[in-house]
Amino acid sequence: MNAAILLNWYYLIFLLPAGIAVVLLMLSTVISIGGDGSGDTDADADVDADVDADADTDAEGDGGPGGLSGALGVVGIGHAPLTLVLGALMLGWGFSGFWAVRVLSEKMAPGVFILPAVAIATVCAVLLSRSAARIFSYFVPKIETAAVSRESLVGQEASVVYPISATAGRAFYYDKNAVLHDVTCRVRPGQPVIGKGRKVILGAYDETTARFTVEPSPFAED
């Protein structure tokens, strides 16, 4: 195959995202190994928490996730780090689209094969990102559970990452082993909303809903 052919637009729309994904995943790995990775982890976690909290709100309002949160959940955002999901999406899009173009271009003109190639790439990208997110979400909770159980978090101080009200909210807590616990929280009915960035005390844990009842931390600085 002539390398110059890869510069055609119908190859570039697939190869460029794949290349960006490789660079993105490599940088993420280097940052995680070379430093504590807290900046990248917090950025991913903020997005994931927002998506999960939106899904919680949608589910309580109409019986299931919908809108933007539902669409993001389909590709795995909210179930795995944003970097991983985006990387898998772009890799799936790039490689499947490249091979679709290679096969279809032997029988069709560019104006004809590009739409089927895009459809194939889209399906493969979603499937790959969903699979990556499911694998991640399958193994990580087992690691977290082995470190500290949910019930043992009662009485601990956590940081709010999505405003906590009587119907939605999430907080982060790092245990003594530096394991991140992303917990769903609620305030008691009638209590004011606790804003993002505030400290809360994790109170009673409901195993049925997997939620903590929280109150503002008396130890937090105003």
Image (tube, rainbow, N blue to C red):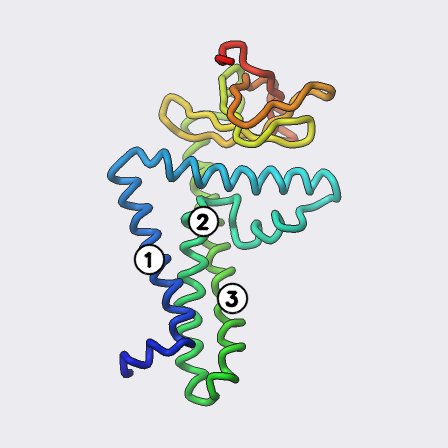
- Image spot of residue 93 (x, y percent): 45, 65
Which residue is labeled 2 in the image? 135
Between 107 and 2, the one lying in front of the other is: 2
Q: For the residues marked 3 and 1, what is the alpha-carbon distance in whole angstroms?
A: 18 Å
Q: For the residues marked 3 and 2, what is the alpha-carbon distance in whole angstroms?
A: 20 Å
Of label 3 and label 2, which has the lower sequence position?
Answer: 3
The residue that appears at 39% across and 80% down in the rendered structure is 102
Q: In this view, does 191 lie to the left or right of 36?
A: right
- Marking on residue 122: 3
Q: For the residue carrying disc 2, how many other residues have a C-alpha within 10 Å: few (<14), some (14-19), or many (20+)?
A: few
Amino acid type at mark 3: Thr
Q: In this view, does 94 lie above or below 82?
A: below
Q: In this view, does 189 lie above or below 111?
A: above
Amino acid type at mark 2: Ile
Element assignment for label 2 = helix
Element assignment for label 1 = helix
